[in-house]
C-alpha cells in the first residue's frame, strides 16, 4: 500500500506540469512583444532553453516530502540543538518572476528522532524552487520539519537579496531581507532562540 503511494508520487515528480514546448511557444510571443526578433540567431533556441530553465526553477512543485525524506529518520538520544546553517537557496519572487537568493539557517531540538542532515537542504530546495515570497518559504520549511520530525521546536531564518529590489523599483543593491519562523521551544523559549542566533552568527561567512 505504502509502496504504491510512493510510486505514484515519483511519476508525478518526473512529469512537467505542462505539455513540453508549450511554454517555449509562449516565450516566442513574449520576445516578439518585447520588440525582439525570436528568429535571429542568438534567440532561436532561447524559448526552449527558457522553458527548461523555468521547469527546473519550479521543480519544487513536483517534489514531495515523503520521497525526499525517504525514511531517513533515526531514533537517537540527543537532546541538544541541531543546526544546519548557510544553506544556499535560489528562488523566484512570485510578484515579478525575478530571482531572490540567499542563505537559510535551520535548527531543531530533537524529540524522539533526528533527520539525515542532507535532507534539510533538500527540503529547503523543494520550497525555494517555486514561485515564492520569502516569508511563506521560511514558514513552509519550518512547518514541514515540524510535521516530519515532531521535534520540541524548529527555527528557520532566511536571509536573501531580491533582484526585483536590486534591478528595478527602489534599486537598492545592498539591502537584505531577513525572515524567521520559530515553532515550539523556539517560540516559547528565549534561551533556545538566543542559542540559535548565537550559533549562526558564530563565524564570518556572511552572505
Ligand atoms: Zn519581487
Image: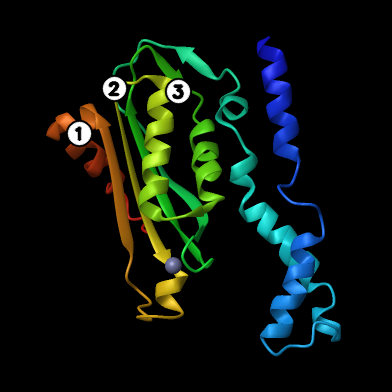
Check disc 2 and report the residue beneath it: 80
Q: Residue furthest left?
A: 190
Residue 140 at x, y = what percent?
41, 40
What colour scheme was applied to this rendering of the protein?
A: rainbow
113 w.r.t. 37: above or below: above
- Which residue is rendered at x = 85% and y = 83% of the image? 39
Q: Quadrant of the C terminus?
A: bottom left
Place residue 7 in its image quadrant: top right
| Mark 3, secondary structure of its residue | helix
- Lateral position of residue 198 relative to residue 166, left or right: left
- Lateral position of residue 111 relative to residue 28, left or right: left
- Lateral position of residue 196 relative to residue 27, left or right: left
Q: Nearer the viewer, mark 2 or mark 1?
A: 1
Q: Earlier in the sequence, mark 2 or mark 1?
A: 2
Residue 139 at x, y = what percent?
36, 41
Closer-to-camera residue (20/68): 20
In 3D space, how far apart are the residues under numbered discs 3 and 1 (Cα atoms)?
18 Å
- Which residue is rendered at x = 38% and y = 33% of the image? 143
151 w.r.t. 128: above or below: above
In 3D space, how far apart are the residues under numbered discs 2 and 3 (Cα atoms)?
18 Å
In 3D space, how far apart are the residues under numbered discs 2 and 1 (Cα atoms)?
16 Å
46 w.r.t. 79: above or below: below
Closer-to-camera residue (45/103): 45
Residue 84 visible in the picture: no
Amino acid at each position: 500500500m505504502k509502496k504504491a503511494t510512493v510510486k505514484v508520487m515519483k511519476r508525478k515528480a518526473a512529469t512537467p506540469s505542462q505539455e513540453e514546448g508549450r511554454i517555449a511557444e509562449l516565450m516566442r510571443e513574449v520576445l516578439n512583444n518585447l520588440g525582439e526578433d525570436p528568429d535571429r540567431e542568438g534567440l532561436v533556441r532561447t524559448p526552449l532553453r527558457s522553458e527548461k530553465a523555468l521547469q527546473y526553477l519550479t521543480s519544487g512543485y513536483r517534489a514531495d516530502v515523503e520521497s525526499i525524506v525517504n525514511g531517513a529518520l533515526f531514533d537517537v538520544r540527543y537532546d541538544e540543538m541541531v543546526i544546519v546553517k548557510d544553506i544556499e537557496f535560489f528562488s523566484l519572487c512570485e510578484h515579478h518572476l525575478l530571482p531572490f537568493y540567499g542563505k537559510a539557517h535551520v535548527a531543531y531540538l530533537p524529540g524522539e528522532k533526528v533527520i539525515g542532515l542532507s535532507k534539510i537542504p533538500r527540503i529547503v530546495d523543494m520550497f525555494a524552487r517555486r514561485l515564492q515570497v520569502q516569508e511563506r518559504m521560511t514558514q513552509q520549511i519550518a512547518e514541514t520539519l515540524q510535521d516530519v520530525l515532531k521535534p520540541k521546536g524548529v527555527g528557520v531564518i532566511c536571509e536573501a537579496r531580491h533582484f526585483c529590489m536590486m534591478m528595478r523599483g527602489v534599486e537598492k543593491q545592498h539591502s537584505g531581507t531577513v525572515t524567521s519562523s520559530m515553532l515550539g521551544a523556539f517560540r516559547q523559549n528565549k534561551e533556545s532562540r538566543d542559542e540559535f542566533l548565537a550559533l549562526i552568527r558564530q563565524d564570518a561567512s556572511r552572505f
